[in-house]
Amino acid sequence: MLFRRIWLIIFSKTKAKKIAQASLFIFLVIPIILLIKNSRRIIILRNDFTAENLATDILDSVDKDSILIVSTDTPLFNTQYVYYSRKLWPDVKLIHFSKLYLPFYIKQLNLDYPDIEISSIIDTSDKFGRFLKENSKNFTIFTKQSFSLSSGRWLPWGLVYKYLAEDKKEDVAETVARNEQLWKSYHDPLQGSLSTYQNLYLTDVLRVYGIARLEIGNFLAEEEYYDLALPHLLLAKKLNPQDFDSYLLLAQIYMRQNKCSQAENEINQLLAKDSEDLTALYVKYQNYLNCYHDLSRASKVLEVVEKARKKTETPLEKL
């Protein structure tokens, strides 16, 4: 009663009624509106298997009797879930990269996979290199992430990378053929709920597919398989538009194919995001110079490049 009297003293009945109505709207009506608005985004996930499909595609990328090293949240958690719940890949030895420095995990690996050569923690790049070298004698090794190596190299292999020891010779034609086969067998991440909603639960899946598309596109471009590289890079740009490398690679391939206007279109898309991007400006200069063979426009762009470059320099007096 005392509270009510104080309330009526401070506010008139009319004001109190309006405040009560506003409070009701804020604490009752708005949550209901948000529930209705977002219910479709949530309900659609009930029958969505985009995350599981990513894991299946990763596991189907590797050979039988191989080692698969996985890290980073989206590939790791989804792959572990599908691997341990479905039990369809008994010959694949799944390793959590980020736990290799933990003694208890090494003991667990020795129990689960006694034929793997690993006796102590791996906490340096040299130790990891020795692990790869020793185990590549008996197993094909794959990883979801391309780690820096002192010897050997990683080959893009669909959604994963395949380890190639230093003493092994790469068969480019085989790598290209296998990648094309793998990508044709994969699920389309835009076929599920992501075709309708950019659901926060799943959007990182697009980034994972996009990066892998970019990697194989880059590999194919380096090996001068330009026609094969283009579809991968176009899809990489679609799946992960925030990664500017796909635009730059597309521009450079178009330049190699004398498709100057298409190269310019890719460059301009980047410059629309950042008009002073030095790399994009320099590629634009190269396009005018070597593709259009227009020295006048190339010179003008070069001036813009120099101005943009100077803005990034730190004056000596500020050092």
Image (cartoon, helix red, strand yellow):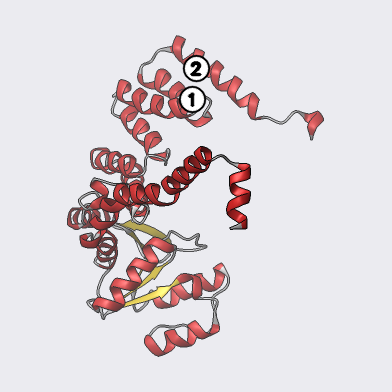
**Nearer the observer, 197 or 148:** 197
Q: Is residue 244 left or right of residue 44?
A: right
Q: Position of residue 192 (x, y in %)?
A: 22, 53
Q: Position of residue 252 (x, y in %)?
A: 37, 32
The residue nearer to you, when weighing 267 against 260, is 267
Image-quadrant location for residue 232: top left
Q: Secondary structure at mark 1?
A: helix
Q: Residue furthest right?
A: 317
Query: Residue 164: in sight, yes or no?
Result: no
Residue drawn at the location 37% of the way across and 77% of the way down: 137
Q: In which quadrant is the C terminus drawn?
A: top right
| Real-space Cα separation, disc 2 to disc 1, in angstroms | 7 Å
Do the numbered discs 2 and 1 sit on residues whose CB atoms are within 8 Å? yes
At a point 29% along the width and 56% down the height, the residue shown is 42
Residue at which label 2 appears: 301
Find numbered disc 2 in the image and state the secondary structure of the residue it sits on.
helix
Query: Quadrant location of the N terminus?
Result: bottom right
Q: Is residue 187 at least partly visible in the picture? A: yes
Q: Amino acid at mark 2?
A: Val
Residue 11 in picture, x, y percent from top left: 58, 41
First in sequence: mark 2 or mark 1? 1
In the image, taking residue 124 as reference, residue 262 lies left or right, namely left
Placement of 16 over or under 57, stated as above or below: above
Above or below, comparing residue 220 to residue 68 in the picture: above
Packing grade of label 2 (10 A; few <14, some 14-19, many >=20) is many
In the displayed image of the protein, which residue is found farthest to the top?
Answer: 296
Which residue in the protein does label 1 denote? 281
Q: Vertical placement of 252 versus 132: above or below?
A: above
Residue type at mark 1? Leu
